[in-house]
Structures are given as structure tokens and as C-alpha cells.
Amino acid sequence: MTLVVAFVRKAGNFSELVFASDSRLSGGDRNDHAQKVFQLPRSDALFSFAGNTKYAYPLMNQMIRAIEAYPQSLDRRLPLGKLRAHVLRVFQQSYSSIHGLPVNEKYPDDPDNFFLIGGFDWQTATIAAWVLSFDKKAKRFTFRPTLKKNRVCFVGDDTDATKEAMRLTYERLRDSGKTDEEIDMEPFEILETMIKNGKYDSIGGAPQLGKSFQHLNTVLFQVMWPAAGTGEIRPHMTGRPLLPMEQSTWPLYDPSKGFYSTRDSSSVLDVPSAQYWDSQSDKGFLP
């Protein structure tokens, strides 16, 4: 259930952190309206998850409440590296509190989740991101830095899918004559491809997309995508197509056209071409 990607995108003279994922939850049936990319309350970081929601949603909610309740974290005085440590402690506390286990069971089921957390760290003046997961032997949540050696990281509960996504991304970069330092939206394009080809049944629904910027802000995007059933290209928010009467002020990403703003637009389906953001410089952001 889920393919998530984090990558550092070159945007003119600046770099930005991009998180993206599919929208499918699977557990006997399929739910393609599941949010998986989130803004944290402190506004400088993004969060995403892959794996079973039995643990993912409770842990994520406890993390959000912990950030909201701690002023130094909420107003970003707490650097991202220390936020990561705080999140690990909250996760471990919540896991260790599980009780009422079956007879002769010493520990709860091992969480099979992967969590991505990242943003621009003011303390180091760099983009920072980590993968959090559960060490089954130590029975503890642990972390590893990512986006250090490679500027793109796919995580998910299907290792074949993550390996294929990484391979396809670097093949595309190589075919385009690009290096890691020149990534635009290629990892997102690979995510699109893997959603559309249906090879992995646990990966599906509309893509979700968020960005973290060096000015310590984050934003989530609507994504233009074919609606299930009709195939009509509709704006999707966190995996769900907007209803005909709904409008959103969230900026949009159209895979065929790039990023653009909905400001001063009467309809997200009728945005004048002059409002399109330049795909390299994102000129005109914030919307």
C-alpha cells in the first residue's frame, strides 16, 4: 500500500523539497481517496507514510498534536533534527503503550510502515529529510537520513516497486543528460507511470504533491488527473476529485502543463495561460 517519493528539485537558482505519493489504501478492498502527503503544523516540513494504517494514522495524529502543543516546535524554534527526535519518542511511546495482547504475546504486531519527514532546516541551512521505520529486532522506531548521496528517495512496502521506481528515474535522467543536481519533475513522472500501468495493485489513485521551500513554508497542490469512472480530467485534492460545485484556492499541478495558480480564476478548469508558473523558476509563487 503506497509508493512515496521525496526529491530535491532544481527551481531556477533555488532548490525545493518535493513529496509525492499515490492515494490508494488496500486491505481486501481499494480506497483511492486516502491522503498520504501532509503539512506539519509548524509550516516548514512535510510528512508522508507508506504501509498499514493501523499504525500510520494514530502515530501521525499523535505527532501532529505533539507539535501543536509545544510552542518551540510550532513556531519552528526547534530545528528539524530535534523535531525528528521528538517524533521518534512520540512514536515509541505510542507503540509501547499498546496492551491487552493475546495470551503469550510479549509485543504488539510489528509496524510495517515507512514514514518520510523533511523540510528546510534553518539550523544547517540545508534541505533535510529522514526515513523513519520500525526495527523489528530492537522493537524500536529508528531513522536514517536520506537525500544525501542521491537527491531522490522512493519508499513503500513493496521493495520491488521502490527499486523499479529508482531505476526508471535514473534511466530517465541519464537519457535526458541530467545529473542529480538537475532534477525537475522526473521522479513524479515515474510515480505517474507506475500508477497508470497498474503493474502493482497496491499503487493507485491520483498522485498527491507537496513542496517545502527555503523560506520555511510548505504548500500542497491540487493535481489534474483523470477521474475514476469518467476519465474526465479533474483537479484532485489529496487523491479526491473535486465535486462540480467545489473550488479550491490551492495551486495546481498539471502533469502536461506544469504548476500554476488559481488566483483570480473563476474556474480551475479555465485558467488563462498567462497564470501558468514557469516550470523551472516557479515565478509568481506564492499564489
Image (tube, rainbow, N blue to C red):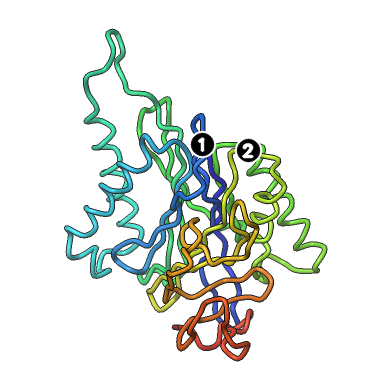
* Residue 174 falls in image quadrant: bottom right
Q: Position of residue 204 (x, y in %)?
A: 59, 47
What residue would you read off at disc 1? 26
Quadrant of the frame with the C terminus: bottom left
Is residue 105 placed above or below 1 in the rendered structure?
A: above
Q: Residue at x 40, y 79 (%)?
A: 215
Is residue 119 placed above or below 14 in the rendered structure?
A: above
- List the single residue furthest toward the right: 175
Could you classify mark 2 by the number of other residues whose Cα lies within 10 Å: few (under 14), some (14-19), or many (20 or more)? some
| SS at badge 2 | loop
Q: Residue at x 22, y 53 (%)?
A: 65
Could you classify mark 1 by the number of other residues whose Cα lies within 10 Å: few (under 14), some (14-19), or many (20 or more)? some
Label 2 to label 1, Cα distance in Å? 9 Å
What residue would you read off at disc 2? 201
Question: Do the CB atoms of the residues marked 2 and 1 lie less than 8 Å apart?
Answer: yes
Q: Nearer the viewer, residue 133 or 148?
A: 133
* Residue 199 falls in image quadrant: top right
Point out the tag, 2 or 1, that comes first from the N-terminus: 1
Is residue 89 placed above or below 127 in the rendered structure?
A: above
Query: Which residue type does callout 1 highlight?
Result: Ser
Q: Residue at x 48, y 52 (%)?
A: 145
Q: Residue at x 53, y 67 (%)?
A: 235
| SS at badge 1 | strand
Q: Position of residue 79 (x, y in %)?
A: 31, 64
Is residue 208 placed above or below 123 in the rendered structure?
A: above
Q: Nearer the viewer, residue 225 or 164?
A: 225
Picture mark count:
2
User: Is 69 positioned to the left or the right of 139 in the image?
Assistant: left
Query: Which residue type does callout 2 highlight?
Result: Asp
